[in-house]
Image (cartoon, helix red, strand yellow):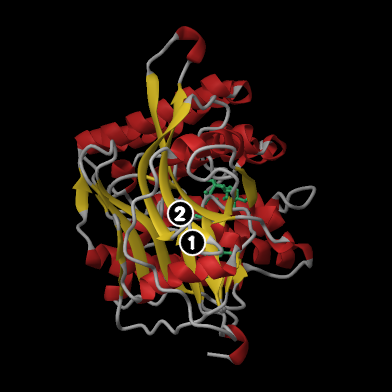
Amino acid sequence: MSEAATHPTAPSPAPPPATEPAPGLLLSLEPLLREWLPRQRWFAGKGRPVAGFSLVAATELLPVGTAKAGLLHLLVRAHQPLVPSQGAPAHPGDCYQLLLGVRETLPPRLAPALIGHVAEGPLAGRTVYEAMHDPRLAEVLLEAMRTEAHVGELRCGRDTRHDIPEGLVPRLITSEQSNSSLVYGDTFILKLFRRVVPGDNPDLELPRELSLEGCPRVPAPVAWMVAELDRGTGAEGHHVLGVLQPFLHGAADGWELALSMLAKGEDFTAEARALGRATAEVHTALGRALPTVTLGRQQLESLVDGMTGRLESAAQAVPALRPYAPGLHTAFEALADLAAEGRTWTAQRIHGDLHLGQCLRAPSGEWSLIDFEGEPSKPLAERRMPQPVARDVAGMLRSFDYAAHSLQPPAADWATACRAAYCSGYADVAGADPRTDPVLLRAYETDKAVYEVLYEARHRPDWLPVPLAAVHRLATDPNADTP
Ligand SMILES: Nc1ncnc2c1ncn2[C@@H]1O[C@H](COP(=O)(O)OP(=O)(O)O)[C@@H](O)[C@H]1O
Ligand SMILES: O=P(O)(O)O[C@H]1O[C@H](CO)[C@@H](O[C@H]2O[C@H](CO)[C@@H](O)[C@H](O)[C@H]2O)[C@H](O)[C@H]1O
């Protein structure tokens, strides 16, 4: 550990025994949350008004009364009626993890973290802010994991094979994220999940399994924080709140790397091939570690029904997709035809949302895959189901196409070469080339492109032409995107 990576002053404050936050706490915070929460990038309920909040769990990690800076850990449910005008029943609402700092006054360096000033209730007169911006409070989280603290309903655990040094200096990473991550001394990264659901989060479950399998392609979880909630909280059960893993210092994000090499006219096929190998290594290890199943006719019919349903609802939501729907259906029908002929496929646990942005290349040139949460909008049970590996392969193939669209006109030959190299790399390790199963691959690429149309229409309308171009090809020429 380098000198610069350790804290020069006092040791981190240990989390105290649990204390019950004062009654009326949520009521006093509600006006601030109502204004602040919907503006956060990770807020999943955008576009639907928040009718109110309920407190699922509250833990004082540092007392808010006495210390200079208090730390409150809250799980808060945001209630959002689906169709308020029609008086529809209230949506149960998503549960969010909030880490709030509480001070008398906020020093200027923490101004960007401000949530607001509390007018009444137990915190009246105090300033509430995002605790992760405050190194003093971020240290408390690492210390809780280092000491395997149990505080209220919060439980920290760790893999004792890894040392967690004291006093690593924290910093919040600022990239666009669905969650929030803190880097400690360039040694560890702690991902704090924002929208939390009961059950095993695959972003902890799968990297742990891969680590036990000795698969080096995924950073192994070093520690974790969970909440064990009792009945009566409206969210009983086990909730994964955060995962600490080694920080791959100096690693390049696959998406950024692909764009920069493409812009410079540099060949990316060697990287694409290495990515194919890395994907296959992860799949092979997951296939060994966790159960695999055979998808027979019935399961394939329900797979095809899911794809068809997603296409129909995306076409409802995005008019530009409608002209292509009949052509896209043929991709799913072809899969249904194979199933009707008695063809079966193996399914296993996979990454579930693989694209170039989920791949990190270390300075050594080794690739790692991160972010095993799956598509966050899907229910947890669905994300944890075994699926054909072709789904991850299709995600990566779509990503090469996205990257090619960073140039105008799009670098179609670049994408074709990368897609082929990726499949070859995959075959080197897995022994089976994804291209030998074109019907399944086309069905998954079509499903992903349809998902992307909806995603871009909702989040980045300027990007909509990228998946729409793919949809056009996939709908009009079944062989157009064959790698
Ligand atoms: N182990 C790691 N080492 C270095 N950087 C990482 C690591 N894990 C994540 N990151 C960085 O953090 C960003 C967000 O991580 P990710 O797991 O994708 O979070 P989210 O689910 O919030 O999008 C990544 O794009 C990457 O740049
Ligand atoms: O960030 P997440 O992992 O939650 O994924 C979502 O956002 C991605 C964009 O950030 C989106 O990916 C799409 O755009 C990427 C380029 O920005 C491209 O590499 C991917 O292939 C493409 O699907 C992803 O679909 C969405 O779930």
- Mark 1 vs ligand 1: CB below 8 Å: no
Does residue 214 appear to the left or right of 35 in the view shown? Answer: left
Where 175 sits versus 160, above or below? above
Res 443 seen here: no
Judge whether 379 appears above or below 433 on screen: above
Q: Give the side of residue 414 with respect to residue 79, left or right.
A: right
Mark 2 / mark 1, whichever is N-terminal: 1
Q: Position of residue 364 (x, y in %)?
A: 56, 84
- Image coordinates for residue 89, horizontal then vertical, percent: 37, 16
Measure the C-alpha gap from mark 2 to mark 1. Answer: 13 Å
Compared across the picture, whether 272 is left or right of 332 comes to right
Q: Secondary structure at mark 2?
A: strand
Could you say which is closer to the camera, residue 399 or residue 243? 243
- Give the labeled residue for mark 1: 66
Q: Residue at 61% across / 20% down in the picture?
A: 319
- Asked which quadrant contains residue 270, the reply is bottom right
Q: Which mark is residue 72?
A: 2
Q: Where is residue 414? Give x, y as percent.
A: 67, 59
Q: Is residue 278 above or below residue 345?
A: below
Q: Disc 1 on helix, strand or loop?
A: loop
Quadrant in which residue 475 is drawn: top right
| Residue 125 rendering spot, x and y as whole percentages | 60, 45
Q: Is residue 110 above or below residue 425?
A: above
